[in-house]
Amino acid sequence: MSTATSRVLSRLDQHRPWLEDLYRHLHAHPELSMAEHATSARVIEEIKGMEGAEELEIVTGLATTGVVVVVRNGEGPTVLMRADMDGLPVAEDSGLDYASTVRVQNELGESVPVMHACGHDTHVATLLASLRLLLESRDAWSGTLLVVFQPAEEAENGADAMVADGLVDRLPAPDVALSQHVLPGPAGSVLVASGPIMASCDDFRITLRGKGGHGSAPHTALDPVVMAASLVMRLQTIVSRQTSPAATAVVTVGRMVAGTKTNIIPEQAVLEGTVRTYDADVAAACLAAIERTTRAEAAAWGAPEPKFETFDHLPVTDNDPETTAVVRSALAAELGEDQVRVFHPESGSEDFSSLPNAWGIPYCYWGFGAFEASDWRKREAAGTLAELPDNHSPQFVPVLQPMLDTGVRAMVAATLAWVGVGSGH
Ligand code: ZN
Ligand code: ZN
């Protein structure tokens, strides 16, 4: 363990009750994407109460609820540390005394439950605690920190919105960016891997145009429902027949909308879906194949030109090998080699990399374990891990400890690998 890390973490014991209370408060008060007003206000309030707060630059108004704290502490590298803040429209079913009972109106005016079902509350709490500890041991490190509290990861647009609001112009350029996510795994451990670990995401919408008519006389109409059914099956052959077996890709049509009544052939059918890959070229090839197949399907029916649109793009989360090696050895030194597990690539997506990509800097994104370790190991041995809830489940509630401590120790150790006095990096 480096001396800088042990010095900064020496006050963790003292601050643990504060950290746990803060986490429980955040957990009980989740907010939906781009509506993280109370969370953002609490973040600012906590920061203003920290040691040396009067010297901090607190940048607000990036993507409405986004908060960035700039900590200047002498010569040295600039490290971006990021947490996302949003909850999800999920009804919590955890039985905990600090469970969320929050309901809000969503953008459509419907009443929906809200829960921190992805664990972003752990990210906010552990990043605030890391900041507090680093501020209280300024002599243990030298450099600049950009501590980022980002809205709307779940809506896939929070990081992009911060960039659009002038992130790059308003802040000093970082040398490296770090972020972590609480994930299924034994609490106390971290999950690390180099290279692509989370997929890119490209959502698409297809509008097939037909010709409406009576359901009893299909020959006088042009049926977009049959066209859509045929197209969905064809799209499933893109991955099996057109992408390389060595590449990973998923094409899913998740939404089909057509028609109003049994005996009416509708005018149009709308399909929406998503493409997930670990390679921008593979994603582009899949999208091109989807569009080409869609146009050919319509042409085969003699139908009007269909409309093909893409929306919601998330880049691949692709950990820089050199940066990841530094992070990995810092985490192993702090937590123990046996607590560093392999982060197996996921087909889920994440918008964190939009922040480092805005500057063109390297980054590392890792996981930390959510569940009680002895139960995890028992299940691992028995092959029953799948019974545990995944992120976004109404039962996804991490154990308090050592989950929270591990999140703080990991973020502090990784950050000090760049700015720690005597860290040698
Ligand atoms: Zn999530
Ligand atoms: Zn998440």
Image (spheres, rainbow, N blue to C red):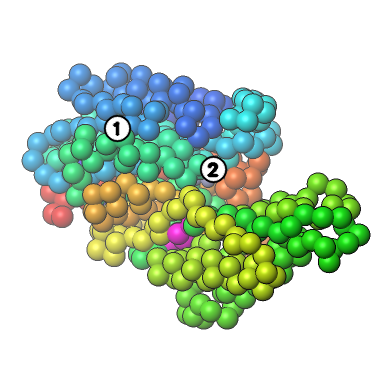
The residue carrying mark 1 is 68
Residue at 84% over, 52% down:
264
Q: Is residue 92 above or below residue 41?
A: below
- Rendering coords of residue 358 (x, y %): 28, 48
Residue at 71% in and 59% down:
210
Mark 2 lies within 8 Å of ligand 1 (Cβ measured): yes
Determine whether the residue tagged by mark 1 lies in a helix, strand or loop.
Answer: strand
Identity, as a three-letter code, of the amino acid under mark 2: Cys
Image quadrant where residue 136 sits: top left
From the viewer's perspective, is residue 52 above or below residue 219?
above
**Which residue range is magenta in the image?**
197-201
Q: Quadrant of the C terminus?
A: bottom left
Camera-nearest residue between 309 and 407: 309
Residue hosting label 2: 118
Dot 1 amino acid type: Val
- Where residue 301 appears, as percent x and y from the top left, is 70, 70
